[in-house]
Amino acid sequence: MMTKEEIGSRRPTALTIAGSDSGAGAGIQADLKTFAALGVYGTSAVTAITAQNTVGVRAVEEVSPALVAAQIDAVLEDIGADAVKTGMLSSAAIRPRISEAVTRGKVTLWTDTQGVD
């Protein structure tokens, strides 16, 4: 694992806050692949876990808002982020926790339109 100093000296960092796609075609898996392709060090906070493939979604389980916020805080307090991208926000209850955590981290937020209620 690289230290915060090594990460910061090498390339920009981005945090994706989104659902996990077991088929890796969307969600945090796709975001992390995109970040890597663009030379960005990617970190993540998982909002939901899905069982899906190229055919469809079979099941979804939400991560608690407290755990989502804890993931964001853990990343921002240590590694930091030059930008934050949101994807699937699986419940309305998660949104304020994300807003609070991102505000504390003082980072640029880019939102996707993947909100699910």
Image: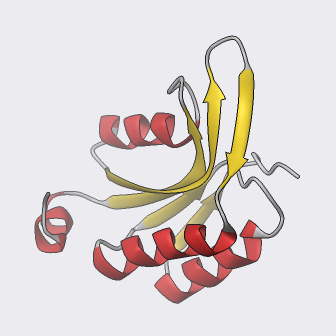
Pick the front one: 32 or 50: 50
Pick the front one: 39 or 116: 116
The residue depicted at 80 percent of the width and 70 percent of the height is: 93
- Provide residue 88's location: percent of width, then percent of height: 69, 48
Specify the farthest residue to the bottom.
104
- Provide residue 35's location: percent of width, then percent of height: 38, 43
The residue depicted at 13 percent of the width and 60 percent of the height is: 2
- Vertical position of residue 35 compared to residue 80: above or below: above
- Provide residue 76's location: percent of width, then percent of height: 40, 76
| Quarter of image, res 50 | top right
| Quarter of image, res 37 | top left
- Vertical position of residue 34 compared to residue 43: above or below: above
The residue depicted at 57 percent of the width and 74 percent of the height is: 69
Specify the farthest residue to the right.
117
The residue depicted at 29 percent of the width and 60 percent of the height is: 12
- Left/right placement of residue 32 relative to residue 49 reads left
